Amino acid sequence: MKRRTLDLIFAVGGVVIALLIVVLGLVLQNQANFANNYVHNQLGQQKITFTPAAGLKADENDPCLKTYAGKPLVTGHEAECYANHYIGVHVTLVNNGETYSQTSNDARTLAAQLQAMPDQNSAAAKQLAAQVQATEAKATTLFQGETLRGLLLTSYGFSIFGDRAQQAADVCFALALVLLLAALAGFVHAATKSAEQPILSHPTT
């Protein structure tokens, strides 16, 4: 077998493999574009805008809030920032750090105590009723805040899949380029005079 034959076999094989990797990269690129566009469109419909830097309070001092200050929320990373460092901070202030589940349980406990009181018109009953109402209002606020936070973090998680697909697509394109360059070098080498040399043949006696 001449070296030219071996060069052509490897070069053609490299081109075929490179094309297959390019196809894989295009599929991954398509998935990355879908994830990013879907997250962008869904978040854009919420019409959330970050508080301008001048309006940030003392407890809203995370660097990402300053980076995105005054901007509309349209990306997964912006959603993660808003969910954890804006909503996440505010919900802890609603009921001394208690969650919706804890606050809702407190409201039900107070309501049961109110219902068990013999005189619903007494001053103590009216005071307890006001406490029940206030606790239920806090539970509603926490439910809304935690729900929005969860939805934003879900969008962030979905965007991460898009980022990973983009990274994988970039690796595929880079690898395909290397293989194509190697295949091109193989074709060039096959055209040289040295490619006429025989290889993988048994010496004659």
Image: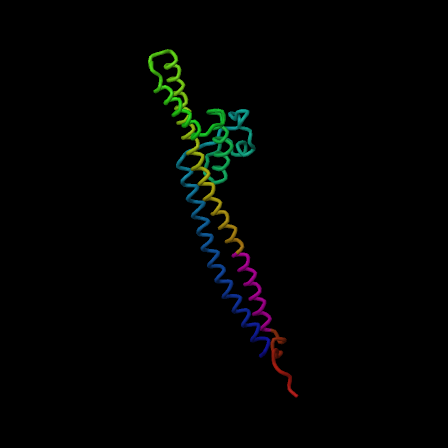
151 magenta-colored: no
Question: Is 175 colored magenta in this rendering?
Answer: yes
Task: Give the answer, above or below, for where 143 lies relative to 195.
Answer: above
Can residue 191 be seen from the camera position used here?
yes
* Image spot of residue 199 (x, y percent): 61, 78
Q: Main secondary structure of the magenta part?
A: helix
Q: Residue furthest top?
A: 123
Residue sitting nearer the eye, 103 or 46: 103
Residue 124: image location, x then y, percent: 39, 13
Q: Nearer the viewer, residue 42 or 84?
A: 84
Residue 14: x and y in percent read 53, 66
Residue 10, relative to residue 50: is it above or below? below
Q: In this rendering, does residue 90 appear at all?
A: no
The residue shown at (64%, 84%) is: 203
Q: Quadrant of the C terminus?
A: bottom right
Residue at the (48%, 56%) spot, across then down = 25
Residue in view at x 47 percent, y 43 percent: 157
Q: Nearer the viewer, residue 133 or 62?
A: 133
Part of the protein shown in magenta: 172-191
Q: For the N terminus, give its image quadrant.
A: bottom right
Q: Number of marks in the image? A: 0
Q: Residue furthest right?
A: 205
Give percent across and percent down for residue 62: 55, 31
In the picture, measured across the screen, residue 21 lies left or right of residue 123, that is: right
